[in-house]
Amino acid sequence: MTQALRLAINGASGRMGRALLTLVREDRRFELAGALVSAGSVHHNTPVFPELPVSLRYTHDWSAMTADVVIDFSGPDGLVEALGYCTAQRAALVTGTTGIDASLQARLDQAAQHIPLLHAANFSLGVAVLKRLLRDAAVALPDWDLEIVEAHHGRKEDAPSGTALALGDAAAQARGTNLEKDAVYAREGRPGARRSGSIGFAVVRGGDVVGEHTALLLGQGERIELGHRATDRSIFARGALEAAAWLAGRTPGSYAIDDMLQARLSR
Ligand SMILES: NC(=O)C1=CN([C@@H]2O[C@H](COP(=O)(O)OP(=O)(O)OC[C@H]3O[C@@H](n4cnc5c(N)ncnc54)[C@H](OP(=O)(O)O)[C@@H]3O)[C@@H](O)[C@H]2O)C=CC1
Ligand SMILES: O=C(O)C1=N[C@H](C(=O)O)C[C@H](O)C1
């Protein structure tokens, strides 16, 4: 049997971090090397599995840890710290953090020259397929209006979601344009008639919604709605663990979830 990969989870005390910890306990492909939290975390130095006879504690001390691969679901600041560790130690990095601005994106691109790095705004298989369907529909119906609606729990900090932006970007690229030019993020007062070719975003926040995305393609007298609803956060955690097992040991570079799913989705 091959040796277990030493895995560190960054943002370990969060919603996604906890979903990962639950799964990784039962996953023989991995040995949990660290559960990282922020410098000021109330979880720092508390036991990760208080109900089990294991000594692992949440920590902010990256220096005491040896990991082959890091999975990060912490937020932009935490991602910067994970990047620092992975680049210095030549560890692989899987990150699902969203709300990444252009300067952080440039740092990810730079780091990917030295380490294998996979960033995905959504680790669900269903969303990967939705993106493909949307690309096809956007090309087949170039004149139809495209609007993307997303809904998430009330604690989510970024908007629109990373997935909504990735869907918009995929459709824009498929139509030979780009999201920076075409996106409309807000309408209020009298914004005037809809600009042809624009891609509108609408955001819903509240309750415990795990994550819902609908792409509306609006024609004259008809419309298509392509949607995905996540009802259980463990689907993202499962996808991230698959990505970590797939990514560790690869040559440095920037990988996408489509690279990992290629074989499966092209069947
Ligand atoms: N790609 C995907 O499939 C998915 C992506 N996401 C994204 O993942 C990210 C996290 O989401 P979620 O788990 O819901 O958020 P949470 O807020 O529940 O968890 C994030 C955790 O990160 C910790 N954290 C904050 N700063 C740092 C830091 N500097 N270093 C280490 N840890 C830190 C915080 O814990 P503490 O205070 O204890 O440090 C916090 O609990 C978001 O960007 C979200 O959009 C979410 C779901 C799926
Ligand atoms: O914050 C979340 O919860 C989620 N964030 C991701 C995003 O921004 O797209 C993915 C998922 O929808 C859950």
Image: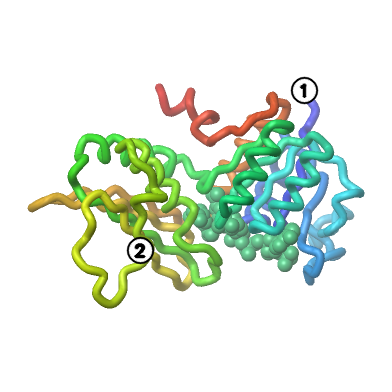
Q: Is residue 196 left or right of residue 3?
A: left
Q: How is the image coloured?
A: rainbow
Secondary structure state at the residue bearing disc 2? strand
Mark on residue 202? 2
User: Where is residue 206, by image quadrant?
Assistant: bottom left
User: In the rendered structure, which amino acid carries the disc numbered 1?
Assistant: Met
The residue closer to the viewer here, 53 or 80, is: 80
Characterize the local packing of mark 2: few (<14), some (14-19) or many (20 or more) Cα atoms within 10 angstroms. some
Could you tell me if residue 141 is visible in this image?
yes
Q: State ligand 1's quadrant.
A: bottom right
Image coordinates for residue 176, horizontal then vertical, percent: 32, 36
Residue farthest along the right direction in this orientation: 64
State whether label 1 is within 8 Å of ligand 1: no
For image coordinates 19% across by 52% down, the residue present is 218
* Marks 2 and 1, the one that precedes in the sequence: 1
Pick the quarter of the image with the N terminus.
Answer: top right
Image coordinates for residue 160, horizontal then vertical, percent: 45, 60
Q: Is residue 165 above or below residue 128?
A: below
User: In the rendered structure, which amino acid carries the disc numbered 2?
Assistant: Ala
User: Where is residue 86, by image quadrant?
Assistant: top right
For image coordinates 56% across by 41% down, the residue present is 239
The residue closer to the viewer here, 115 or 37, is: 115
Name the residue that disc number 1 marks.
1
Image coordinates for residue 27, horizontal then vertical, percent: 69, 39
